[in-house]
Image (spheres, rainbow, N blue to C red):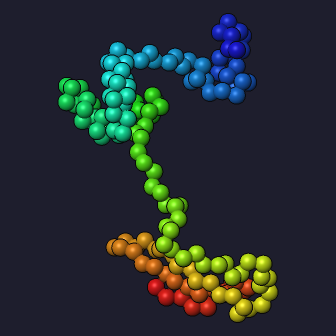
Amino acid sequence: MIDRDSKLSIGGQAKLLGISRGSVYYLPKPVSEYDLDIRRRLDELHLKHPFMGARQLRDQLNRQGIQIGRKRVKTLMMKMGIEALYCKPNTSKKTPGHEIHPYLLRGMTIHRANQVWALDTTYIPLAKGFAYLTAVVDWATRKVLAAKV
């Protein structure tokens, strides 16, 4: 793409191609032996203990005599494409004992004020703690009828 023997400068050629001039001179760095050793050990540890995250893997490497930080372990894990396995929260499972209430507004057209009201509760983070704002809203006009913090 870039011809170094051309009459047109390298910067001019880069501009024509729509790439930065610095990317013409870029040479990728080879991975050091030290990094390869750490990656190999991380891979071994991850295969033995797939539930361990960056903190626990860092502790294991420190016990093996390799001084490395959590952020470096996390970076290497991201480059290697490994992450800790853990159970996801089961928030969408139905509880058998809970009653299911019917949706009374299905198929209903709301065309006038004061026909349907809705209650909206919003979490508001503050400098010291938090507050909840609760408002009664008219569905037809979208006006706030009442509000309380």
The correct choice, above or below, for 117 with respect to 90 in the image is below
Q: Residue furthest bottom?
A: 114
Quick check: 120 left or right of 2? left
Vertical position of residue 68 compared to residue 145: above or below: above
Which residue reaches farthest front? 96
Residue 112 vertical placement versus 94 (above, below) = below
Which of the 4 quarters of the picture holds residue 120? bottom right
Q: Residue furthest top?
A: 5
Asked where in the image residue 8 lies, by quadrant, the reply is top right
Tell me the quarter of the picture where residue 63 sits: top left
Query: Which residue is located at x 72 percent, y 86 percent?
Result: 141
Q: Is residue 31 above or below residue 120?
A: above
| Labels in figure, total | 0
Where residue 123 sits in the image (x, y, percent)? 47, 74
Q: Nearer the viewer, residue 9 or 107?
A: 107
Residue 67 in sight here: no
Q: Which quadrant holds the N terminus?
A: top right
| Residue at point 28%, 38% (across, down) | 56
What percent of the width, then of the height, locates residue 58? 28, 34
Q: Position of residue 41 (x, y in %)?
A: 32, 23
Residue at image x 43%, y 71%? 125
Q: Can residue 145 be seen at all in this image of the molecule?
A: yes
Q: Is residue 8 left or right of residue 88?
A: right
